[in-house]
Amino acid sequence: QDKFNESDDAMKLLIKMIKQKNYLKQGCLQSLSFAVTNHSKNCIKLIENGGLKTIFGEFMNRKKIKKKYKKDHDKDKIEEYLCCIMVHLFCNLSDVNLVRLMNKFKEKDYAKIDRLIELHTK
């Protein structure tokens, strides 16, 4: 995790590959989940590199996985990685970054909280 934090491009590259929505997405989310686990510097770096938009975009994505990626992606695992990332962001952020994270949940009439409840009842 420290090596990941030392790299200038690692976080940007992971976020870019998640945005491309190709067969690498699940592996990138798993790597990102590992990178932010109990590591506040990586959590801050994720926020600074615009990762909130990407993470919440994937979190709110209710579409089915494309047929050609079906064998490579497991929707439940992707949701698990996204929830894990959010938990560690809440645990490791403070000040302005924590406020930015909390404000993401207030957007669009609390739609993200509805999504969390939907996942909880699953």
Image (tube, helix red, strand yellow):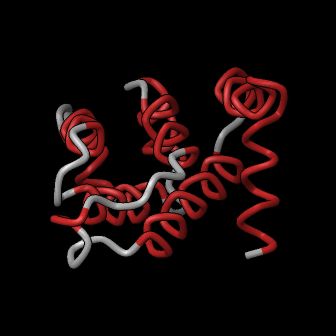
Q: Please say whether residue 61 is visible from this viewpoint.
A: yes
Q: Position of residue 48 (x, y in %)?
A: 44, 24
Is 104 rendered above or below residue 86?
above
Quarter of the view holding residue 46: top left
Q: Looking at the image, which is closer to me, 112 or 46? A: 112
Quarter of the view holding residue 109: top right
In the image, taking residue 2 as reference, residue 96 lies left or right, namely right
Is 30 rendered above or below residue 2?
below
Q: Position of residue 40 (x, y in %)?
A: 54, 47
Question: What residue appears at the point 51 percent right and 46 percent down from the top-left corner?
Answer: 61
Is 4 rendered above or below residue 97?
below
Q: Looking at the image, which is closer to me, 38 or 58? A: 58
Quadrant in which the N terminus appears? bottom left
In the image, taking residue 10 as reference, residue 34 lies left or right, namely right
Question: What residue appears at the point 68 percent right and 24 percent down from the top-left corner?
Answer: 100
Q: Position of residue 67 (x, y in %)?
A: 23, 65
Quarter of the view holding residue 84: bottom right
Quadrant in which the C terminus appears? bottom right
